[in-house]
Image: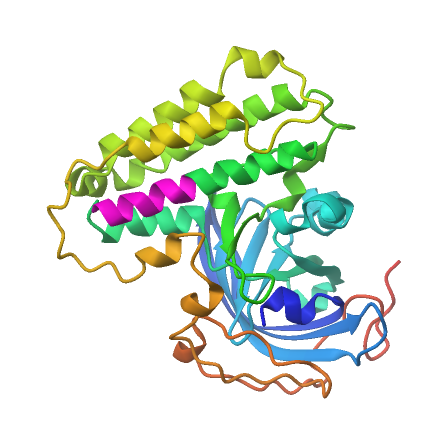
Amino acid sequence: MSTVATYKDFKLVKGYLKVSAKEWVKTGKKKHVEKIRNAAVVLILRDATQKQEDITIRDNVTRCGSGASKDVFTLDNYNFVVKMMTDEKTKYEWRAEQQRFDRYKHVVEKEMMYCFGQIFLEKTSTGDGDASILLAEKLLFTGKSKLTSLFVTMQCTPQAWESYVQMQVEILRLLFRFVHHDVVPWDAKIDNVGLAEAREPHSAAVWVFCDLDGLRDTTEYPNVGGSFKQILETMVNQDRFLMQPHQNDAIAHGWQAPYEKVQTLMREALVTHEMGTERWTCPSPSPPYLKSLETQMLAVKPETGDKEANFPYPFTQNLLPRTSASEVHRAAASSHTVTAPMAPPPAASPDASMKSASEIAMGSEYHSTGSGFHRGLPQRG
């Protein structure tokens, strides 16, 4: 079963974190910032229906990415990620992602990265100051990570090109489904969407939006059409800049010309004056001009043709949305430990076979978060 199917009724209520390693990281305009690299965590999940016992997860986490005010960590042995917010200036946004998920869950649950709760950490736990952590499902990959891997490691074969175009088409369909429900994914770009494992048995993996604090509705942006036009314009410009660090690789592999052609097609079809002045009350999730654009994008062919027909591309199929989660995880190990007696086994982690499981004893060195605190620490309001 998928992570969402297994833990859907549970919510993070308490957490413990012990930093085991830090490192200096260059971020934005700041020269270097010391960030957590590895930590030991204990996460306590509670069944909202009160039909099952609490689940306690003990594991190690490793930082896998950083944003302007947040760091993202992956668990070694579970298909979860932990998003940690630490910037004092953005404290009012600390609960934004969970709040947005809860707010729009009834209309676009299948289009969002699933969130399992957000809690606060005491400064004694992080060592640097107060923080907030969000527990969410781990994606199979983001659009940016897959596109970057294609630029760097693969020739522009017809198969690889088909995978990229299919990914871009699915991302556009995802964004239009949001707007169909009058929800504006304001910070839409290729690194804020990703492929999540299938939510239901025997179903395909699904494309989801994974930066939920950027979601808005008609109460904040009444002109959905005008807002969406700006979003698409920003997205196309940002996606174009993704090519720059890999330009030499892209030219050598035949990616640049067809990639820029697709970006031009998207800009000409979607970033239009008509879309900007149109006020959508109930836009179609797949309007005629989107279908026409998909046909034009699929008609673009890579320059190299089948020159590299014998080039191995073992992970190309994982890019296609029709690939099932079982196929993606076929080679992954399935040996995991869940501490709660009534908890179902967790979904296999794609990289579990490359890492050893670790048991973490929850002692006095851990510090509690959430609805209460351990060993006499004051309770937050």
Residue 177 position by quadrant: top right
Q: Report x, y in % for residue 189.
A: 49, 37
The residue range painted magenta reads: 157-168
Q: Report x, y in % for residue 135.
A: 65, 62
Residue placed at 86% from the left, 74% from the top?
Answer: 50
In reply to whether residue 75 is colored magenta, the answer given is no
Q: Report x, y in % for residue 81.
A: 57, 63
Magenta span main SS? helix
Instruction: Work out whether residue 112 or residue 379 is closer to the camera in this orientation and state it.
Output: 112
Residue placed at 59% from the left, 85% from the top?
Answer: 337
With respect to residue 109, does 301 lie above or below?
above
Instruction: Work out whether residue 365 or residue 69 is closer to the camera in this orientation and state it.
Output: 69
Instruction: Work out whether residue 242 or residue 260 is closer to the camera in this orientation and state it.
Output: 260
With respect to residue 51, does 322 lie above or below?
above
With respect to residue 333, does 79 lie above or below?
above
Describe residue 146's horizontal placement relative to residue 124 as left or right. left
Residue placed at 29% from the left, 49% from the top?
Answer: 150
Where the N terminus falls, by quadrant? bottom right
Instruction: Work out whether residue 206 or residue 353 is closer to the camera in this orientation and state it.
Output: 206
Describe residue 257's horizontal placement relative to residue 370 as left or right. left
Residue 72 position by quadrant: bottom right
Where the C terminus falls, by quadrant? bottom right
Residue 29 seen in render: no
